[in-house]
Amino acid sequence: MKNNSYTLAFNEDDRAQRLFLEFSELQGQINISHVNSTNHIVAWHRHKKQTDYWFCVKGSFKIGLAEEIDGETHVKWEYLSDKIPRILKIKPGIWHGYKALQPESIMLYYLTEKYDTSDEWKVVPGHFGEKWSIEDK
């Protein structure tokens, strides 16, 4: 009889609880982040090989994307919400991060590679002079 169980890993810090699902049949990995607070920013990082596909299961997120073009860094914002479902593709080399806009927001993301710390570069929020706050209108 074939073994139908898969590896689950759990990580929790002050920003979110993360569940990592590793399927031997997949090249990559599926992760789920449950973000309790709107006060934390999970940014910035980028990958050399890995492509990310992000989907908001519950709540909403402000997504930061930064790309270096001709020696200048350009930051743009995307928004993911359970009210307007869509998948955001983040290619290798793009700095990215997120902030939950509602408490208890949930992000599901597929990584084309299994998580590898040697394929991730990080800088702190504010590194590009960006503002993560939401303006009142």
Image (spheres, rainbow, N blue to C red):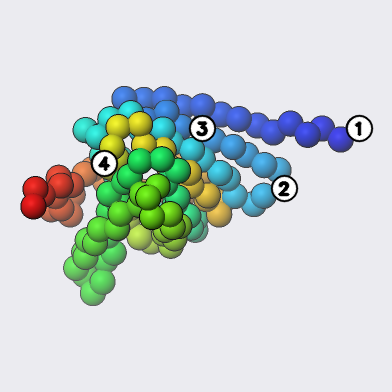
Mark 4 lies on a secondary structure that is: loop
Q: Nearer the viewer, mark 3 or mark 4?
A: 4
Tell me the residue that label 3 is attached to. Answer: 19
Q: Nearer the viewer, residue 68 or 16?
A: 16
- First-in-chain label (2 vs 1): 1
**Rendered position, 1 above or below 120:** above
Q: Quadrant of residue 86?
A: bottom left
Mark 2–mark 1 CB contact (< 8 Å)? no
Badge 2: few (under 14), some or many (20 or more) residues near its Cα, within 10 Å? Answer: few
As measured in the structure, the alpha-carbon distance from the residue carrying label 3 to the one carrying label 4 is 20 Å
- First-in-chain label (2 vs 4): 2
Q: Of the residues shown, which amino acid type is indicated by label 4? A: Leu
Tell me the residue that label 4 is attached to. Answer: 101
Mark 2 lies on a secondary structure that is: loop
**Res. 14 visible in picture:** yes
Tell me the residue that label 1 is attached to. Answer: 1
As measured in the structure, the alpha-carbon distance from the residue carrying label 2 to the one carrying label 4 is 34 Å
Where residue 115 sits in the image (x, y, percent)? 52, 43
Residue at 51 percent of width and 27 percent of height: 10
Q: Of the residues shown, which amino acid type is indicated by label 2? A: Glu
- First-in-chain label (3 vs 4): 3
Q: Name the residue furthest front.
A: 83
Badge 4: few (under 14), some or many (20 or more) residues near its Cα, within 10 Å? Answer: many
Q: Of the residues shown, which amino acid type is indicated by label 3? A: Leu
- First-in-chain label (3 vs 1): 1
Mark 3–mark 2 CB contact (< 8 Å)? no
